[in-house]
Every structure is written in structure tokens, then in C-alpha cells.
Amino acid sequence: MDIRDLLLKNVMIMDLKATTKAAAITEMVTKYAEEGIIDDAKLYQADIEKREAESTTGIGDGIAMPHAKDKAVQRATVLFAKSAAGVDFNALDGQPVHLFFMIAAPEGANNTHLQALAALSSLLINPKLVAALKEATTPDEVLQLFADAQAAKEAKEAEEAAAEAAAAPAAVETTPAEKPFIVAVTACPTGIAHTYMAEAALKEQAEKMGVAIKVETNGSEGVKHLLTKADIAKAVGVIIAADKKVDMPRFDGKHLINRPVIDGIKKPEELINDTLAEKGPIFHAEGGVQSDADDDEKKSTWSKIYADLMNGVSNMLPFVVGGGIIMALSFIFENAFGAQSGWFTFTNNLGNYAFSFLVPVLAAYIAVSIGDRPALMPGFVGGYMATLASASIVKAQNPAGFIGGLAAGFIAGWMIVGLKKLFAKVPRSLDGLKTILFYPVIGLALIGLIMFFIVNPIFAFLNGALIAWLEGMGTGNAVVVGVILAAMMSIDMGGPFNKAAYTFAIGIYQASGFKDGRWMAAVMIGGMIPPLAIALAATLFPQKFTKTEHSSAMSNYVLGLTFITEGAIPFAATDPLHIIGSSVIGSAIAGGLTQVFKVNVPAPHGGIVALALTDQKLGFILSLIVGTVIAGLILGLWRPKAKEA
């Protein structure tokens, strides 16, 4: 998209009449409404004012860039306005604003629009262009100035790219002294203007100073130029010029300067000098969390698969928890008011609505983890098809279900990765078509064909066989499965084993039409025991815990009863052998007992609240108490006395 497609002559105001900030915003919004760019002036102006309340868009040097992205906008447009007298716009340098660029972006703005807006924003750091715009008297002059500036910028980028490509072979053979290297992240709340202006300012200043820099942008079109682990490790330091949350844990151990995005625009030299001098404090991430920005690093196949799976599971869990608790309430209402009551029908339907998204959301976010945003829609549709018994050439009684959804997510993700490689050599002028046409249409067609003719028939059969096997399982075999699932919940308390067991139980629960909660009973009680056992051991054997540990352990009564296994993690981190060993034994025994007592928990969350839903209340209570007491006693007797009593 040409920048002149955004800068429309009929929405330019070459002689702005307003003398105050509020009046200037109203005058420009009114112009947009008159020209049909927006269909709801009040909504758009409210969003403009909301953005101004966060931080002024008067960036200094006589420029302001108020902007908003909402449903009132009918087409992406930039309104250029010029005030000869100047307007007090609360600019950062305290000077009046003479040039206004009011950016209007539709709620569903595609990448082409966003890229054009980003390009426009980056041009405004050019002082020659700004000076010329202040002298312009007609809309045609304004358009020509931007066209010339854009052409010059593109020519320079092409020249740099050619020089970089030509120098690549030589770089392999020689080892000249390298430039100092730094990395940066720029981001603003709307991600339209300031994000890209800060990027351009930092890169331009770094070039003047002979410094190599890589800038990651967190804008409306997503993360661009993602910093890899290798980039961060190589950098002298990190600059964060952002007014919104960015991925921080990856910078653990690096000198880091964190400033508002406007500093990236106005103070790039200061930020770069301070970074080179290592003036930024060393950043420490809580818990040393691993970043997702390691795309270029070699990882094991399993670690990649696990990371992708966990992305799907973590995004699915809110539906599980919300739907599970609401559905649990519905069963309570059914017992109290009857199956025909509005209390029951509303809450039961609401819980079911949430559960209907489990498999589609799981598949969608597995796909996104692999193929990024273009994989979202194919993954979601593939997951949805896996929930439909008729969505295949085989009219199976059972749908492909949870395991079919897992397959759909991985297939959709890698399919998009393949399409990206296929279209890698498409001319840059067609880049916008990739995300708005090629990936959605081709991706949908391919995932539909794969699911309909391959995945659904295969996994519908496997899903049906698994359900039939579980339904026909004798008590002895059921006890073994219950022992294994419950033990897995305690092995890593929220890690891969824990999530695998929980995911399996949810899959069976979903495939049975939310009726078979036997495995959910084993998983839930198995996950409740570690924190409860720690709390019990601290109560019975206080000398085995420090004062701080004892105080923290008491909160585990509440965490354990509400099925929050992670309450045991701090204790397991400092004493893994005794905590995990005792917990696994207690959970395994409790998991087996749930199958002996035939405990059925028809909700995937809730902890002790689930007691109200099962017909085997005594079995639930006995399984929980026996497992907790055994684990608590083993821990209390086995653990050595604390050094600080």
C-alpha cells in the first residue's frame, strides 16, 4: 500500500483553527466524520482521549500523532493538519504543536495497513521532512513530500540490503573488529505510531554512532524482528522503550535500561550511550523464566513438542476451570431446585458452552505456538472438526475428540510453517496477501481435507476404542490406572507429568460427554495431596520445618483443598527427595482408592467443592484423608529436623 493511499487530500486541514488541545482533537475528529472515515465520532474521540490520558502523543519538535484503533473507523487513514499559530498539546518538550497526524485504524486492520502506518510513522523522525512539511501550503505538496521521503527511504534500505548480501561471503573468511552490539524492544499501547518511530530513531542514531543494533517491535501487526537467545547473549545491553508489557524474563542477567517509548524517539543517543557504558542495572527475572524468543536455538524434539502442547493446554485451562466450576454449581442447583429450574438450566448450559471450546482452543493454540498467528484459524477449525462425529468420511459414533484435536493442532501449525517456506520467495509487494488471503484460504482448505479424510476417521476409531476399553475395564485394571494418574500429579506438581495426567483425564471426560469422571477423581485427589501433606506434616512435626516454612505450610491447607498442587512447589524446590517422594506415595494410594470406591467427579476442577457433585462422597473423603495422612506421616518421619527450629 502506498502511503499516499492513507494521506487523503480531502481529509487534510491546512489551516487548523483550534487553539487548545481539546478543540484540536474535536476539529480533526469532526473532519473525519464529515468525510465518512468514521461512523461514530463519540466513540473514536473517546478512544483518542483515552490514549492521550495514558501519555501525550505530542512528541516534540512541533509534532503530535494522536491515534486510535476501533470499530468506528471505516478505513485506515491519516489526517494531516497544520496550525500556523501552534497549539498547546502538552507536548513533551513543552513547545506548541504545528503538525498533526491523526491516525485512524480499523479494528480489524490488516497487515498491509499496519505496515503502511508504521512506515509513515518512521518517516517523521526525518528533520528535513518535518521542516518541509511546516512550509507546505497545499495537500499536493504534502503528498509529494511524503512520496519523495518514502522513495528515498526504500532506496536506502535496498542499498543496505545489497551491501549486506555482498559482504556476507567476506564476513565468513575474515574476522574484522566487530561493532559494539545492543538490542532493543519498542512498544506503545496501540502499537501504531510510537512503536515504529522509536525503532527508526534508535536504528538511525546507532548507525551514526557506528553501533550495531537489532530492534524488536511489539506493534499492532504482532512482534517483528524477534530477539533470539543468541542476539541477547551477544548484546552489551538491552534498551526497553515501551509503554506496555513486553516479554522480560529472557533478559535475565543483562544490563537493561527501561524507559517510556517516547524516550526511544527523543533520546536515542542517550539510551545508546548509557547502554554501551553498562549504566543500566542488571535485570533479574523472577525464577529465571525461560523466554520464547529462542527460535534459532537448537532444542530437542521433545522440548519443542512439549512447549507447543503446553501453549495449547494453558490457553485451554480457563475454559476448563470456568466451565468446570459453573457446571459444578449447576449440579448443586439441580439437586436443590430440580432439573427444570432456571438456576440449573442456565448454569449447566453456560458450563457446556465453555466446554465446547476445549478442543478447538487446545488445537488453535498448539498451532499458534508452531506457526504463529496465521495458524490460529486452521488450528481452531481443525479442533472443532475433531469434536464432530459426522465431520469425516466415516460415520463413527464417536468424534476424533481430544486426541484428534491434539493432532489437528500440530498438523495445522506445521502446515503453516510449510506454507511460509513455500511463499518465502513471493515478491514483497504481495506480502499483505499472505496473511489476509493465502494462509487463511489455503490453510483452511488443507486442514479441512486432512481432518475429513485422514485424521477424523483414524482418531474417531482410536477414540472409540479407548473409551470402550476404559468402560470395560475391571476394578483391578482401573486401580492401576488410578494409581499411575494420581502419582503423575505429584511427580512434578504442575510440570509435564502433572499436565499429561490432567490432560488425559480431561480428554476422557470430554469424550464421554462430560459424564465419566472416574479418572478426574484420581487426578484431582492426587493433585490435592502434596500441599495437604505438607500442611499436615508441618502441623504434626513442627520441628521439621523452619519458622518461615511452617508459616507458609499452613496456607497449603487452603491450596490443597482447592486443587492447587503448585502450593507444594516451593517446598519441593528446596527438599525434592522428601517432599516429592512422600507425595507420590500418598497420591498413588489415594488414586487407587478412588477406583476401589468408584468415585466419579463430574467436573474438571473445584477440589473439595467437587465433593458436592459425586454420589460417592464417603469414598472421596476416605481416599483424600488416607492419602494425605500417609503422605504427611512419611514426610514428617522421614524429613530431618530443621536447622532453625
Image: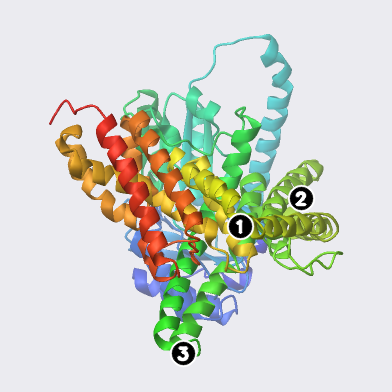
Kindly report the distance in space between the C-alpha atoms of the residues bearing marks 1 and 3. 29 Å
Q: For the point 40% across and 58% down, which residue is it? A: 57
Q: Which residue is mark 3?
A: 341
Three-letter code, disc 1: Gly
Colour approach in the figure: rainbow
Give whichever of 638, 349 is nearer the camera: 638
Q: Which residue is mark 1?
A: 507
Q: Which residue is mark 2?
A: 429
Q: Of callouts 1 and 3, which one flags the residue occurring earlier in the amino acid sequence?
A: 3
Crowding around mark 3 (Cα neighbors within 10 Å: few <14, some 14 to 19, many 20+) is few
Q: Is residue 140 visible?
A: no
Kindly report the distance in space between the C-alpha atoms of the residues bearing marks 2 and 3. 60 Å
Q: Is residue 139 visible?
A: yes
Kindly report the distance in space between the C-alpha atoms of the residues bearing marks 1 and 2. 45 Å
Three-letter code, disc 3: Ser
Three-letter code, disc 2: Ser
